[in-house]
Image (tube, grey):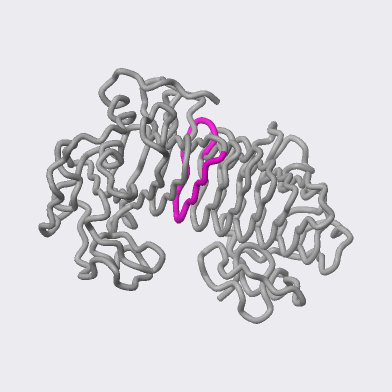
Amino acid sequence: MLRLACAATAILAAACAYDRPALAPLDDATPSDGVAATDAPIDGAAACATDDACRSQVCDGGTCLPSDDARYVAPIGDDAAPCSQAAPCRTVARALAARGARAIVVLASGTYPATVRINPLTQSEPPFDVLLVGGADASQDPAVITATSDGSNSDGIEVYRGRVRLRNLTVTGSTMNDASDAIWTQPSTTVTLERVTVGPSPNDGLACNGCALTATGGAFIDNGHQGVQVNNGAATLVANVITRNAGGGLVIDATACTIASNLVVANGALGGAVGGASIKCTDHRVEHNTFTRNLALDTAASNYQCGSTGIGAINRNNLFDGPARTATGCGHTYSLFTAGMPPAGAGNLVGGPGFVSATDAHITAASAARGAADPATPTDLTIDVDGQARVQGLRDIGADEIP
């Protein structure tokens, strides 16, 4: 959908300002307490596994980035400041304008109430890559980007061109506009989410229009329409929780999709067209997912509708909490259904899911899914929905692998 041009309000003007006025030199002083600070001693070029191992709070490709490479934002910051750790700026737009060779932005815990526009068409500079990271304190108290709430057709993050990576963040839409998405993209963009919570929003959690989407270890939750909508793009979704999306969990019509190790629970509505997922991909792989408590007007759509027609479509090792008719349209192998007759296909079975409880879809040792995944086909999936190791002897069916 089309997006409004930048309005003349102070917040929107800041969100659209990609000109780069001169800033004071970056301050290398020790960060102030509570302002995007970390006690990690490592700063640049050292090996790392997590962001909080680095003084810069950015571990990129296994290496700590220098603090001077990043720009820092905090709710108590000042947009006249140099966006350093010691003197953070207040808005993501200001940090993008103050970027170095790449746009690397670290956000302290708190809420950032202004739409973030990535490489808008009005921008005079060529598209640049963007990495937005929730800082070391965001694991307990997240950094939240939310759409501008002025009634305009604004989303939390809008990606017009280029590539954007988001990590350890929450992104929401605006309750002031029924069409507001948490994240919206233009065609030919690339969006990578790592441990990102998408929603709530009145409309879609993430609307990918011809984009290349990868999402790992996050959540799509409490969106008024669909959790994830992908049209004419490509989607890789691994180890996410997709829940309480009123218009359905996943609606994907794409050239390629890998949907794996996701928990798809309590999506849709009794009068809706889609419950857990509706997926149609030329290159199609749906594997090791758990579908439970999803609703739709047509029972056959309540868990999973497969519209893919490719001979090589893979639907394997999935757990469907319901009869076989709740997963329609494609063949299945080594999948568990909890009622009725299983569909034709190697390894399909009917049995109890053995969930921990009615509201906890982790499986117990009593589950029929335990050790029942395809024993002959190796998997390149290394994690389950909790980020735990997937391969442990005979694999379990569904999103959860019992340690």
Check if residue 367 falls in the magenta segment. Answer: no
The residue under the point 24% across, 48% down is: 72
Task: Write down the region rendered in magenta.
Answer: 188-205
Type of secondary structure dominating the magenta stretch: loop
The residue under the point 63% across, 59% down is: 260
The residue under the point 59% across, 37% down is: 226
- Residue 63 is situated, as x and y percent measured from the top left of the image, at 35, 68
- Residue 53 is situated, as x and y percent measured from the top left of the image, at 29, 68
Quadrant where the N terminus sits is top right
Disc tally is: 0
Q: Is residue 397 above or below residue 130?
A: below
Instruction: Give the residue at the far top of this rendering.
Output: 8
Please state which of residues 143 and 272 is positioned toward the viewer in this rendering: 143
Instruction: Give the residue at the far left of this rendering.
Output: 29
Relative to residue 183, is residue 364 drawn left or right?
A: right
Check if residue 192 falls in the magenta segment. Answer: yes
- Residue 101 is situated, as x and y percent measured from the top left of the image, at 31, 49
Instruction: Give the residue at the far right of this rendering.
Output: 344
Relative to residue 44, is residue 226 drawn left or right?
A: right
Relative to residue 25, is residue 199 drawn left or right?
A: right
Q: Quadrant of residue 111?
A: top left
Please state which of residues 278 and 43 is positioned toward the viewer in this rendering: 43
Q: Quadrant of residue 120?
A: top left
- Residue 158 is situated, as x and y percent measured from the top left of the image, at 45, 35
